[in-house]
Image (tube, rainbow, N blue to C red):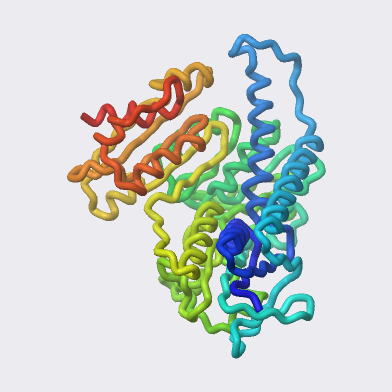
Amino acid sequence: MHDLAIIGGGPGGYVAAGRAATAGLSVILFEKNNLGGVCLNEGCIPTKTLLYSAKVYDYAQHADRYGVSVEAPSVDFGAIFKRKEKVVRKLVAGVKAQMKAAGVDVVAAGAEIRGRSGEGFAVVADGEEYIARKLLICSGSEAVVPPIPGLRESAAVVTNREILALEEQPAELVVIGGGVIGMEFASFFNSIGTKVTVVEMLPKILGPMDAEISAMLQAQYAKKGVDFQLGCKVVAVEGDTVVYETPAGETCRVRGDKILVSVGRRAKLDGFGLESLGVELALNPAGKPYGIKVDEHMRTSVPGVYAAGDVTGFSLLAHTASREGEVAVNDILGKADRMRYDAIPGVVYTNPEVAGVGLTEAEAAARGLDVLVQKLPMAFSGRFVAENERGEGVCKVLVDKASRTVLGVHMLGNPCSELIHGACLAIEHKLTVEQLQETVFPHPTVSEILKETVGRMG
């Protein structure tokens, strides 16, 4: 008998397991693949490792801008991917060590929930039954593969999983979907010399992220040679060719050695016995389930059963999953806590990077909010100018006009992924323009751009 059983060892599951075990609960964690989930094995970490190699190559190619001479830099595709595997192995081993140190019982097998027994919840793995008083479901998500004619039959088609196992660099890559994942892979392959075409159904890239900053990033990658076909619907895949319709109704074709399908992810609700619990599912406007319905404490409709991470279908981000796992465990422990989503950051690790948190202008307008918007080029940061020769970027801050509290911050420029947490704190704790203006920022740092921007709000 365990106090808590957790299905899934991704960022939601393993963070929750460690926290619960450290607090004194007996915890069992089920994971049929490597610990770390999609994030560590097929998403966040491997892609960022690849993107850093691409960034190093970018800098080497333009080292003369910084007074440094580099003779004929080149890309070793195999070596880049081997390094990616090394990084992943190291971090997976680190998660294993964390679980062992915390006293978590890890079962490396697929789990199937068998419903509630007299003592708790029954979970079967490798033919053995385990009982736990509480259950936390962190089964994650899977890539969406749309029903496009010929797509599943094409040997050229890959998802984010298969593209991370390539042995040779494709000369031409077609990316179906211009969201975060699609743009990060477009960035990597464009940087190392692959011809990249992005076909996106929406009229802009990066989905709900700030429209102005998305357009700026698109313009920069268009200059680098990425071909964007926006507002275009893919109607078929014919072998190594993507067939799409333009907004004007014209049928076009583009070929790729590989075709990356990157149109989103969906909650994994099947294959582990969820139906045996009878939990309520969250439904979209069309009445179709998109995740497990939870409250602000990550409780499901079944007492004693919690859910966290992508399986809720709400915020499919690793850092969201980790926080949701913490909230679930705190509720189990009787600690006051609740999940809040106003300050969840989003980052795109292209070169330059994009980062945002809080409301965009479009979202603020949709809510009928009266906001002040202040923008400032990243060049107002001395550190940015020193380290980004010919670099372009911007910082945009949205403030509630009446209360002057910060509602949203959106940035383009390196290294905004490392700056956005300051904006998260400002939104989470409802800081005002005046409070940010009175805060001392270190100089010279690119982080000063936040203070410089709000400093112009009067």
Where residue 175 appears, as percent x and y from the top left, is: 62, 47
Residue extending farthest to the front is: 24
Q: Nearer the viewer, residue 30 or 273?
A: 30
Question: In the rendered view, would you say 146 is above or below 251?
Answer: below
Q: How many marks?
A: 0
Instruction: Tell me the quarter of the image containing the C terminus.
Output: top left
Residue 240 showing in the rendered view = no
Q: Is residue 253 visible?
A: yes
Q: Is residue 9 left or right of residue 315?
A: right
Q: Is residue 302 above or below residue 430?
A: below
Residue 207 screen position, x and y as percent: 47, 50
**Identity of the residue drawn at 65% across and 37% down:** 51
Point 40% across, 64% down: residue: 336
Examine the rendered structure and indicate whether residue 17 appears above or below residue 270.
above
Say which quarter of the image contains residue 19. Answer: bottom right
Query: Depth check: 54 or 26 in front?
Result: 26
Residue 102, how many percent across, how many down? 65, 58
Q: Quick one: quadrant of the N terminus?
A: bottom right
What residue occupies the far bottom of the structure in this picture? Answer: 118
Residue at 75% over, 14% down = 71
